[in-house]
Image: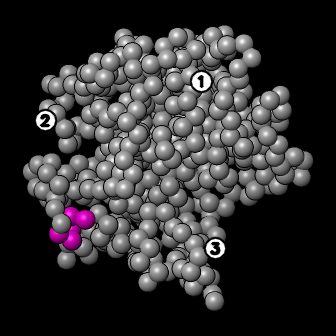
Amino acid sequence: MDLRDLDRAHLIHPITEFRKHEEKGPSIVTGGEGIRIRTSDGETLIDGCSGLWNVNVGHGRREIADAVAEQMRDVAYYPGFWEFSTEPAIRLAERLANLFPAASKLDHFVFTTGGSEANETAFRLARTYHAVRGDHGRQKIVSRAHAYHGITRAAGSATRLPAYHIFATPDPLHVEAPTSYCFRCALGKNYPECELACAEEVEATIIREGPDTVAAVIAEPVLGTGGVIPPPDGYFEKLREVCDRHGVLLILDEVITGFGRTGRWFGMDTYDVHPDLVTFAKGITSGYLPLGGVGLSRPVYESLRDDSPQGLPFMGGLTYNNHATCCAAAHANIDIIEREGLVDNSAKVGAYLLDRLRETFGDHPLAGEIRGVGLMTAIEWSKPGGTEPAGAGPMTHPAAIASEARKRGLIVRALWECLAVSPPLCTTREEADEMIGILSESVAAVDA
């Protein structure tokens, strides 16, 4: 059997319909450089999704591979439990403490293997924080509509996209509140006249549940899988005030937005918000090895340290916490981001890409909103003149446009009513123009 047949016979692909995959088979990626990947069929494709919003520095970065190989020749892995540690993990924690804004006081870190594990750990930390302070009833986590926080049990319950819950009912300790989705406001209001009613609804949810039952609110600085939805001005300032008023921790999920994606190092820089806990993954290694993590603010860490019963450790260990080789990959990746000015490039090329999307598709009758921040952009399709989803016709399904783009050498992602374009942070203006050209042809083909 060749590789395609072996894949169909044995390999499971996430977010893939098994029947269709067995008919069509895989596209086998054999290499890549910059914003492009190569397949075994001889194709060269522009990676307009940065993998899954994670290949921030682009493909084919040999210095990351070299750093990983060097670390593995020394010590590839040893558990981070008890007193054991390794230099890459220690140095990475120090480095992050300096990268996050000083006002956030985020200066203690534990590393996981991805975003779902990071959020699971953050929820456990938040509940433990309240418990050691005597608030044992604070167990609930409030997340927002359209949020994506992972697919493990607790992280999947915090995810509030209906497709993920068709056969998996969310844990009852996870509660949903409205989100900051101005284009299609669930409250039927308009910004700024609404005075950020969506943030007030988070407070109403906390009050309805009982503040003494709520441990934390978790929010993405920019909703990613939910449709690339940036918040309105002032939203996070108000959300921070709501959490403080009720003694609830604020967790920022920076899994997508971290490490330059928004045109700043972190989404919290973009929106000037300081969380109690932060989760991250994806861009910390640009996907070269699996790594995620949780950052704790100093007050949260000190409460966990000082208020926990003597002799009781934090019972939150994972086999691959603080993995030496993965941390080495992160160092090499962050070196590239810093050396090549990719955060600044994300801001400048991202603004250019957004302008070009608006110039090219702004007059299309079904382009309801074209939005973005940094190198996170999207077109949301709707019926003309309103916010109602465009319906079931071929033009109204972003998957049809993504399919046409794929034929022409560009990978973009259909997200519900949206088409997301989020290339690596090393993208140039010329490459942005190339993507716009392919998208223009693809939309025209579907229109026709």
Q: Amino acid at mark 3?
A: Thr
The dot on residue 296 is 1
Q: CA distance from mark 1 to mark 3?
A: 39 Å
Name the residue at the right extreme.
74
Indicate left or right for 437 with 301 as reference.
left
Quarter where residue 416 is shown: bottom left
Q: Is residue 265 visible?
A: no
In magenta segment, residue 395: yes
Q: Which residue is mark 2?
A: 188
Q: Give the mark, 2 or 1, whose residue is nearer the N terminus.
A: 2
Quarter of the rendering occupied by the N terminus? bottom right
Which quarter of the image is occupied by the C terminus?
bottom left
Which disc is residue 224 wearing? none
Instruction: Residue under label 3, please give it.
Output: 30
Earlier in the chain: of badge 2 and badge 3, it is: 3
- Residue at x 83% of width, y 36% of height: 86
Does the magenta run of residues contain 296?
Answer: no
Amino acid on which disc 2 is placed: Gly
How much space separates mark 2 and mark 3, taking CA atoms?
48 Å
Whole-percent x and y of residue 244?
Answer: 40, 13
Secondary element type, mark 2: loop
Q: Which residues are magenta?
A: 393-397
Dominant secondary structure of the magenta stretch? Answer: helix
Query: Residue 277 at x, y = what percent?
Result: 53, 25
Residues 385 and 209: in front is 209
Relative vertical location of residue 183 with respect to residue 210 in this rendering, above or below: below
Q: Amino acid at mark 1?
A: Leu
